[in-house]
Image: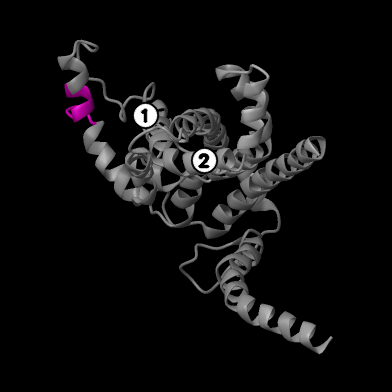
Amino acid sequence: MIAKRKVELWCWIFLFPTLALFVMFQGWPIVASLFYATRDWSGLTSDSSYVGLQNFINVAKDPYFWNAYKNSFVFMLGVVPLHLFVPLILAVILNRPRLKGASIYRTLIFLPVVTTTSIVGIIMVFIWGSDGAVNDALVKIGLLDAPINWLGDAKWSMFTVILISVWKNLGINMIYWLAGLQGIPKDLYEAAEVDGARGTKLFFHITVPLLVPIGAVILLLNVVNSLKVFDLIKTMTNGGPFFATDVVSTYIYRYAFSSEMGLPQLGYASAAGIFFAITISVLAIIQSVLNKRIKGRGK
């Protein structure tokens, strides 16, 4: 009994730094946001006034917030399917034991993941600009008659940001799928081959069903992360042109820390953040319930 308590004590000792950091950088900001959301405060002065739910009412009435809200889901619906299926295809190809140089290919695909997103965004502004490398290449090979303003045209800006996001996060999702593929027992494939199964039959009848649980986790991670996108859009388009790529994160930043809308409105921005956090939480809960049901059926 004493030995068990000592083990538990040491577990808590090792957990304490993580818990302390969580409280300081996650827990306290959440509580503070709930408090600030009920106040009219710029964040620059020491005085503030209580306004109750007025900030939430103002957010709900703002058409620019709903535009950003819609764009967040457009971005999510654009990137999540590609984040799931493209890395899966790459993982299946790179998981082949006879493929030479597989580790090199994995490293090259994973490199963008470890590159700072804001740096990627800044570099992509030059590459995808009107006189950038992308337009130059497409014009030279005859796919375009004239350069396209990929980031300055409302028709193309969201498409461009989605494309860059998929490229940036391709590696991490590929690693997730590789982990799932390498966890499938080889005996199952050997037994199926003895029964005459080959190629696509192996993939759809063994690989896909066994990847469903980890696929559900990957789906959850990508949905939540895509709805929180900020740095890529901030550096590439700043929410433009004409708010075509404005998402909730850039909307909140504009009111909380920027002078674009005049004096910052930290209380209003906190209300917008809580409003959207509730949406993400509801989606996460729904997906968690679905994940449990999928795992339950698998058992």
First in sequence: mark 1 vs mark 2: 1
Q: Amino acid at mark 2?
A: Leu
Residue 133 magenta: yes
The residue labelled by disc 1 is: 160
Q: What label does residue 178 carry, if any?
A: 2
86 sits to left or right of 275 = left
Q: Secondary structure at mark 1?
A: helix
Q: Splitting the image into 4 quarters, where does residue 298 fall?
A: top right
| Up/down of 45 relative to 181, above or below | below
Give the numbered dot on residue 279.
none
Q: Nearer the viewer, mark 1 or mark 2?
A: 2
Q: Is residue 243 something that shows in the picture?
A: no
Residue 101: x and y in percent read 33, 38
Residue 34 as seen in the image, left or right of residue 296: left
Do residues under tags 1 and 2 come within 8 Å of each other at their CB atoms? no
Mark 1 to mark 2 CA distance (whole Å): 27 Å
Q: Label 1 is placed on what type of residue?
A: Thr
Quarter of the picture holding the N terminus = bottom right
Q: Position of residue 138 (x, y in %)?
A: 22, 18
Q: What residue do we see at 58% from left, 72% from top? A: 18
Q: Is residue 29 visible?
A: yes
